[in-house]
Image (cartoon, rainbow, N blue to C red):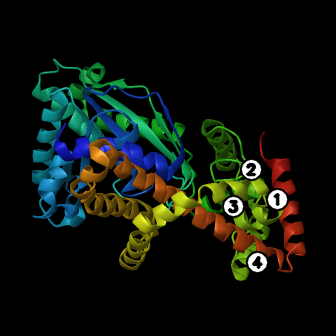
């Protein structure tokens, strides 16, 4: 394990568990195995972070080549990242990728694993949908088998990344690992017709991934299906009152979306009404979650007491993290046109910038509080930042709820209740 990967492996487990409210991993893989993991790619930089931090397997990442520069190449090398070339990169992709396939083979034959985002690209905004997979993962596996004369076992597996919302702090994450496919079992088919078996296995990987994620067949229906889950207060989006485990919420969402994919017409009769409702909310400058919470999940006395008791920590976190957070937030949102990159980029920059700045503590503090006291202080800073962010969200919740209650929204609430009841009649339990 190289240095930067080891650092990320340790640091990300801590910081990502603060970023996500709940994390669940199904079928954690082995640390070391000759396996090619194929994952969906819904959330840009966040996907490799969470898979490195939570999924246990030590992997080398296949990463688009255009992010490798003279400056980043040595950094990415220590983080287990390998360039993969695409047609739009303006190079001889066939020749370049043959070299990469050879590197991939060496990694697999060394009892280590690869992680490939075979969709190739991420959508501009987060959607619950799998794009067609490319064949590179299967090709690399067979290349490795040919190079060792089929003497070593090489495997394929998929990882479904399921977020409630990767761009939102304190959202939830559910990773689902599939059973493995042993590529050696397909030697006869490969030697008889390699293109055919590569295509068949790629389709099989697609089916395995779709089974382990929420997949909306029609890209244009992704927003509508999300709105249906929000109106029913069930499924993968975040709901304050929901006490269900994340795997149960995933099952609810899976049931609804699979039913929609199979019988869209019974839902689409409500599409115009639902879109009009959300347009009305947008016109008033409020979200459905804030609207619902203002009347159904009011701030309690216990919430006030909790925030009061945590106020000293919130102030500590605001001093150490607040100014940096707002500077990073402004920079990222001004320089990254695609919102899907915002959450992960802010997180990476906070880790790197705050981490480097606060390393000065190890020079200044040991003489006052000792080495262990300095380490505890250093590790306490991210937690304090998390508490400060929650305090800010708490204040925003109070202000937003008060603003909504002053509006004339009684008819809008009746419309919401009506739409929720109509959906409940046609949605499977």
Left or right: 119 in relation to 229: left
Number of the front mark, 4 or 3: 4
Find residue 195 and report its horizontal and vertical position in percent.
26, 38
Please state which of the two labelled residues, at mark 2 or mark 3, is closer to the viewer.
2
Looking at the image, is mark 4 or mark 3 earlier in the sequence?
Answer: 3
Residue 39 location (% of width, % of height): 39, 43
- Asked if disc 1 and disc 2 are in contact, CB closer than 8 Å, the reply is yes
On the question of residue 389 being in view, the answer is yes
Q: Of the residues under marks 2 and 4, which one precedes in the sequence?
A: 2
State which tag comes first along the sequence, 1 or 2.
2
Label 1 residue SS: helix
User: How far separated are the C-alphas under marks 1 and 4?
Assistant: 15 Å
What residue sits right under mark 2 in the picture? Answer: 241
Residue located beneath label 1 in the image: 296
* Residue at the disc numbered 3: 227
Q: Earlier in the sequence, mark 1 or mark 4?
A: 1
Is residue 123 visible from the viewing direction of this image? Answer: no
Task: Estimate the spatial distance between the alpha carbons at disc 3 and disc 1, rounded to whole Å.
Answer: 18 Å
Q: Secondary structure at mark 3?
A: helix
Q: CA distance from mark 2 to mark 4?
A: 21 Å
Q: CA distance from mark 4 to mark 3?
A: 23 Å
The percent coordinates of residue 287 (x first, y second) are: 69, 70
Between label 3 and label 1, give the one nearer the viewer.
Answer: 1
Q: State the separation of the CA atoms marked 2 and 3.
A: 18 Å
Residue 403: which disc? 4
Residue 63 lies, with reference to residue 274, above or below; the image says above
Could you classify mark 1 by the number of other residues whose Cα lies within 10 Å: few (under 14), some (14-19), or many (20 or more)? few
């Amino acid at each position: 394990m190289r240095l930067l990967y080891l650092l990320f492996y340790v640091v990300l487990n801590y910081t990502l568990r603060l970023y996500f409210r709940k994390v669940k991993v199904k079928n954690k893989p082995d640390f070391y195995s000759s396996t090619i993991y194929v994952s969906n790619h819904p959330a840009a930089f966040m996907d490799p972070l969470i898979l490195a931090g939570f999924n246990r397997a030590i992997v080398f990442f296949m990463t688009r080549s255009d992010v490798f520069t003279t400056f980043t190449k040595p950094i990415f090398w220590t983080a287990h990242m390998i360039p993969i070339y695409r047609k739009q990169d303006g190079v001889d992709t066939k020749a370049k990728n043959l070299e990469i396939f050879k590197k991939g083979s060496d990694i697999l034959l060394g009892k280590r694993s690869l992680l490939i985002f075979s969709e190739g690209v991420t959508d501009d905004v987060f959607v619950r949908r799998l794009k067609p997979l490319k064949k590179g993962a299967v090709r690399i596996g067979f290349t490795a088998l040919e190079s060792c004369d089929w003497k070593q076992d090489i495997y394929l597996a998929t990882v479904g990344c399921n977020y409630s919302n990767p761009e939102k702090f304190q959202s939830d994450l559910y990773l689902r690992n599939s059973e493995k496919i042993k590529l050696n079992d397909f030697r006869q088919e490969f030697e008889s017709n390699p293109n055919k078996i590569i295509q068949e296995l790629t389709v099989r990987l697609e089916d395995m991934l779709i089974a382990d994620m929420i997949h909306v067949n029609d890209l244009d229906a992704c927003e509508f299906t999300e709105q249906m889950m929000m109106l029913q207060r069930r499924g993968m989006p975040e709901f304050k009152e929901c006490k269900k485990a994340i795997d149960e919420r995933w099952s609810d969402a899976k049931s609804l979306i699979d039913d929609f994919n199979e019988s869209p017409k019974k839902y689409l009769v409500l599409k115009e009404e639902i879109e009009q409702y959300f347009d009305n909310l947008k016109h008033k400058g409020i979200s459905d979650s804030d609207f619902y919470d203002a009347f159904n999940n009011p701030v309690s006395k216990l919430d006030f007491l909790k925030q009061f008791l945590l106020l000293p920590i919130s102030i500590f976190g605001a001093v150490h993290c607040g100014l940096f957070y707002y500077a990073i937030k402004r920079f990222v949102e001004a320089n990254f046109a695609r919102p899907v990159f915002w959450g992960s980029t802010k997180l990476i920059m906070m880790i790197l910038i705050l981490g480097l700045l606060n390393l000065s503590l190890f020079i200044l503090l040991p003489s006052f509080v000792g080495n262990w006291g300095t380490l505890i202080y250093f590790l306490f800073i991210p937690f304090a930042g998390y508490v400060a962010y929650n305090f800010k969200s708490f204040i925003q919740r109070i202000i937003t709820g008060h603003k909504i209650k002053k509006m004339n929204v009684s008819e809008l609430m009746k419309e919401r209740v009506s739409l929720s009841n109509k959906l409940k009649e046609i949605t499977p339990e």
